[in-house]
Image (cartoon, rainbow, N blue to C red):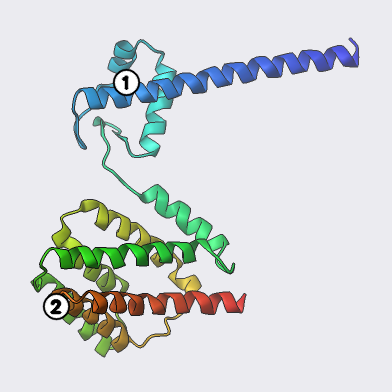
Amino acid sequence: MSHQATTLGSDMTTARSDRLGNRRRSRALEVQDEVKELILRRRLVAGDPLPTESELVEELGVGRNAVREALKALQAVGIVDIRHGFGMFVGRMSLNGLVDELAFHSRITMGDERSHLGYMIEIREALESGLVQLLIDRDPVAEPVVDEVLERMEAEAKVGMVSPETDKLFHDALYRPLNNPLVGQLLGAFWDVYHQLRDDLGEPDEAPDDVARKHRDIRNAVVAADRDAAASAMRAHFAGVRARLARLQEKN
């Protein structure tokens, strides 16, 4: 057989393989859409049980492999929760995938003048600056849980360090009156990324007492419904984070 014929046969085999692969991927995407439509049609919510794999095969009229591929893809994005030995359920929203991706790309661009971490800090500052204004719009009052966290933060500062957990707890408690679960999830995702990278960023430049004071300034401005003071306090709070990132970029 000539080299030309061999090459032609190989190309035809590759083309057939590509077409089959594309059809399988297309069918799997269709099945994903059908499973999502089933969830919506039945008005299922997070935690509700889903039909078994065999039931989906029968109900959707597709092969078992297509169903399995679709379910794995839906599990990866949190739409389906597969618990081996228990069954399948509608998944609960999670930003874990976003956290891992942001942390990875932030790490590989850490020394760049415009890094992913720098972009994320800008977004978080803009988000929180807006959230404190929303709190002021809702006639804020002194929240006991916020004051308790601040007391804990100030106690930690006296012995040398404000823990990341206490810092995160403050922001969770501060925005709780908004009754918006996505706020906590988004801020939690940003915090998780920052926490993963804190060793790369090095030691903070701010004294623990300053960290605690800046958080109290945010609380006081919100309770006093002082919009300008709230904006100023938020800028001061993020100045320390920006300084750590700038110091790292200078080294690189």
| Residue 198 seen anywhere in this rendered image of the structure | yes
Asked if 97 appears above or below 152 in the picture, the reply is above
Quarter-wise, where is residue 68 in the image? top left
Q: Which residue is mark 2?
A: 224
In the displayed structure image, the side of residue 141 where residue 247 appears, left or right: right
Residue that appears at 22% across and 84% down? 154
Residue that appears at 19% across and 77% down? 226
Quarter-wise, where is residue 231 in the image? bottom left
Disc assigned to residue 53: 1
Where does the image place residue 133, in percent across and percent down from the top left?
23, 66
Q: Hey, what amino acid is under mark 2?
A: Ala
Q: Dot 1 lies on which element?
A: helix
Where does the image place residue 233, in percent across and percent down from the top left?
29, 79
Disc assigned to residue 65: none
| Residue 173 seen anywhere in this rendered image of the structure | no
Asked if 97 appears above or below 141 in the picture, the reply is above
In the displayed structure image, the side of residue 51 where residue 76 appears, left or right: right
Q: Dot 2 lies on which element?
A: loop
Where does the image place residue 229, in percent across and percent down from the top left?
25, 79
Residue that appears at 20% across and 29% down? 49
Where is the N terminus found, in terms of image quarters? top right
Residue density around tag 2, few if under 14, some if 14–19, many if 20 or more, within 10 Å = some
